Image (tube, rainbow, N blue to C red):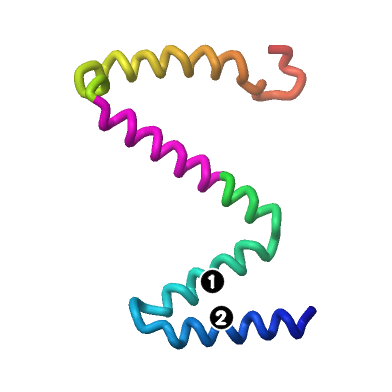
């Protein structure tokens, strides 16, 4: 197993050193960051899940923001979103003190 790992690392380093376009230091830094991220699996999955949610949210927001409907009725859209979120927050709230009974 370690031999296969050493061979894989050798070929990756060789590829990075032979890379002539761009700056290979950024690829090495990204690889080091990814390796450190997966040092503890739980943290990696939480971080990647959060990043995925953020990417989807940005994608949806850009689609909404570029629509003609939003340009004409942005105030109504904001009020509508708040009207949906406030009841959900009230329904799914967590009591501040255990045994609060609320």
- Taking the image as shown, residue 60 lies to the left or right of residue 94, namely left
Residue 67 pos. (x, y %): 26, 27
Quadrant of the rendered structure where residue 22 is? Answer: bottom left
The residue that appears at 42% across and 79% down in the rendered structure is: 24
Label 2 belongs to which residue? 12
| Residue 86 is one of the magenta-drawn residues | no
Residue 2 pos. (x, y %): 77, 82
- Taking the image as shown, residue 53 lies to the left or right of residue 42, namely left
| Residue 64 is one of the magenta-drawn residues | yes
Give the number of callouts. Answer: 2
Picture quarter with the N terminus: bottom right
The residue that appears at 61% across and 67% down in the rendered structure is: 36
25 and 16: which is toward the camera: 16
Residue 56 pos. (x, y %): 46, 39
20 and 47: which is toward the camera: 20
Magenta segment boundaries in residue numbering:
50-67
Picture quarter with the C terminus: top right
**Badge 1 density bin: few <14, some 14–19, many ≥20, Cα 10 Å:** few
Secondary structure category for the residue under label 2: helix
Q: What kind of secondary structure does the magenta stretch mostly adopt? A: helix
Whether the residues at callouts 2 and 1 have beta carbons within 8 Å, the answer is yes
Label 1 belongs to which residue? 31
The residue that appears at 47% across and 42% down in the rendered structure is: 54
């Amino acid at each position: 197993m370690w031999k296969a790992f050493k061979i894989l690392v050798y070929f990756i380093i060789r590829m990075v050193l032979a890379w002539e376009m761009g700056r290979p230091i950024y690829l090495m830094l990204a690889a080091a960051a990814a390796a450190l991220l997966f040092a503890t699996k739980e943290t990696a999955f939480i971080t990647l899940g959060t990043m995925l949610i953020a990417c989807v949210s940005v994608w949806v927001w850009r689609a909404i923001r570029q629509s003609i409907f939003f340009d004409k009725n942005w105030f109504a859209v904001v009020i509508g979103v708040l009207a949906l979120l406030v009841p959900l927050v009230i329904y799914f709230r967590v009591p501040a003190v255990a045994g609060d009974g609320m």
